[in-house]
Image: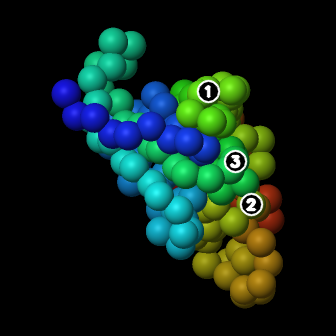
Amino acid sequence: MLNIGGLKNGIVLDHIQAGKSMDIYKYLKLDKLDCQVAIIKNARSNKMGRKDILKIEGGLDVVDLDVLGYIDHNITVNIIKDEKIVEKRTVKLPKKLTNVIQCKNPRCITSIEQELPHIFLLADEENQVYRCAYCEEKYK
């Protein structure tokens, strides 16, 4: 059994689909932050078989819950204070994403106006389809 030390204060992202932790690391830009991050890949899970876990030192301000919901809306966010879980949050598929994904349509206004934010709206929750707010291009 692999043992990773506990967190005094921070957040633990649990129930991440196995293999998705590096996507989360990238989307949350954790490489740019000056805090400790532990990535546990392919941990055994009774519920999921295998899962990834991310432990992030620091406050909730480092985590964009919309990004988490977009990547994997089954993640549990455990908030740790003084080495105890003080709150558990669940994430859901966000209705709107801003500057998380980019429109690939060459005729979209975001291709011409570089400073415009890339905004995507949830068009089909069941199939997890997002469309560009400007040109309605579907994000694949």
Q: Residue furthest left?
A: 1
Q: Residue at x 67, y 82 (%)?
A: 111
Please tell me whether mark 3 sits on a helix, a strand or a loop.
Answer: helix
In the image, residue 140 sits, relative to residue 134, either above or below, namely above
The disc, 2 or 3, on the residue closer to the chain's N-terminal end is 3
Where does label 2 land, which residue?
A: 98
CB of mark 2 within 8 Å of CB of mark 3? no
Q: Nearer the viewer, residue 78 or 58?
A: 58
Whether residue 40 is situated above or below residue 25 in the rendered picture:
above
C-alpha separation, residue under disc 2 versus residue under disc 1 = 30 Å
Q: Earlier in the sequence, mark 3 or mark 1?
A: 3
The total number of labels drawn is: 3
The tag earlier along the polypeptide, 2 or 1, is 1
Q: Does the CB distance between marks 2 and 1 fall below 8 Å?
A: no
Which of pointers 2 and 1 indicates the residue nearer the eye?
1
User: Residue at 50% of width from left, 41% of height from top?
Assistant: 7
* Residue under the point 56% across and 33% down: 83
Q: Position of residue 82 (x, y in %)?
A: 63, 36
Would you name the residue on which mark 1 appears?
85
Whole-percent x and y of residue 56? 52, 49
Whether 133 is drawn above or below 90: the answer is below
Q: Mark 3 sits on what residue? A: 60
Please tell me in which quadrant of the rendered image residue 114 appears: bottom right
Instruction: Inspect this view and state whether residue 137 appears.
Output: no
Of circles 2 and 3, which is in front? 3
Instruction: Say which amino acid is labelled 1.
Output: Ile
Q: Residues within 10 Å of mark 1 (few under 14, many from 20)?
A: some
The residue under label 2 is which amino acid type?
Answer: Thr
| Viewer-nearest of discs 3 and 1 | 1
Q: CA distance from mark 2 to mark 3?
A: 19 Å
**What is the quadrant of residue 47 in the picture?**
top left
